[in-house]
Amino acid sequence: MRLTDLGIPQELSQELSNPDLSGFTPGRVTQEHRERYVVSDGEQEYDAEITGNLRYSAASREDFPAVGDWVAMTVYEGGQAFINSILPRKSLLARRAVGRPGEKQVIAANIDVAFIVQAINNNFSINRLERYLAICHSAAIEPVLVLSKIDLVKEDEIAAALGELMNRGRDMKYILLSNITGDGIDRLLDNIQKGRTYCVIGSSGVGKSTLINNLLHKEVLKTGEISHSTNKGRHVTEHRELFVLGNGGIIIDTPGMKELGVTDDIDGIAATFEDIHELAQRCRFPDCSHMGETGCAVIEAVNSGNVSRESYENYLKIHKEQERFQTTVAEKRRKEKQFGKLIKTYYKIKNRENPE
């Protein structure tokens, strides 16, 4: 296997000719285990960790490697390596970090297409889907909806779910899938192209790991048994991992996500709720909150039925979360700036009192 088999784009191949990278080995992160990594150079995989310089120069979690990243590393005998730098990213899929206000959690890097998996029997939610769409659009990643476990529902239930999608204006590419019967596997493979990178995202128990096992035609990922009380699969995947499929496509498995908070990229929300965003530009007041102002084009469209009320309410909720995230980030930066000034003042006073 070569770097091209791992999906390295032409522009990065040119980047590797940079004299500053001449002493390093290029590779792609295939696994991440709490700041320890597995990196492939196309021929061999290495256990890797980041250098102290990369660790201490990182301003946030975004500056650490993620599965899918292309990196420059120093390789030592015995299969050990140190990651010296992260090569320029094409995309970065991230969500709001759970329990850490104002921080992002990186899901994967350099993704072309995200397969958003929802189990049609108990996990189907357009509100949740719109959150996934927002983070995909923020990263300029193409989203594809995969409705799994169709073997557990009747045809009229499938038709009702697809009708709900249309009623909410979600005219997007979708694939109906059963990991048990194999229905939809071939269609999904038809959507996977050689050299492009895909990721599978969704809640725990929707069949992500089973799907990847089916695509690979072998059991490489553990899968959980179905709970008879909830009819849901149990959480199994604990890390992110990259695989090369038989047709040359690259796919990344990710842990299930119970929470999916948006970050500070307003473009993703605008792209997801494009109809609402366009209407907002016609409001009488530039600072309209779209919650009750007279002459609000958005509210008028909702009241007339031209915009789904459910999508409108979800838009307001997600937009408020995004604003809170921005406010938290701004507050953290303000406090860091104040702290920096205090440290600077402290050393000024210390140097005056104790001149060399």
Image (cartoon, grey):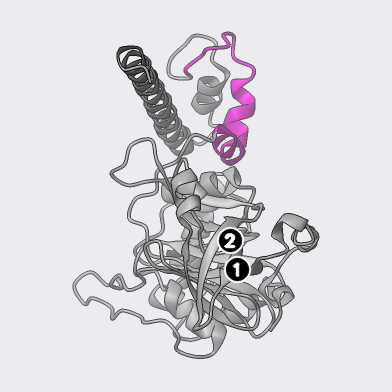
| In front of the other: 255 or 169 | 255
Residue type (three-letter) at the residue carrying disc 1: Arg
Q: Is residue 319 left or right of residue 72?
A: left
Magenta stretch contains residue 288? yes
Magenta stretch contains residue 274? yes
Which residue: 46% across, 81% down? 179
Image disc number at residue 65: none
Which residue: 66% across, 68% down? 26
Q: Residue 124, percent across and down?
A: 41, 59
What range of the chain is rendered magenta?
266-289
| In front of the other: 327 or 304 | 327
Q: What secondary structure is found at the residue carrying circle 2?
A: loop
Residue type (three-letter) at the residue carrying disc 2: Asp
From the viewer's perspective, is residue 147 above or below residue 43? above
Q: Residue 234, percent across and down?
A: 28, 72
State the residue lying farthest toward the front.
356
Residue occupied by mark 1: 28
Residue 117 can be seen in this image: no
State the residue lying farthest toward the bottom.
218
| In front of the other: 73 or 103 | 73
Q: Is residue 287 left or right of residue 202?
A: right
From the viewer's perspective, is residue 253 above or below residue 11? below
Query: Going from the N terminus, do you reach mark 2 or mark 1 first?
Result: 1
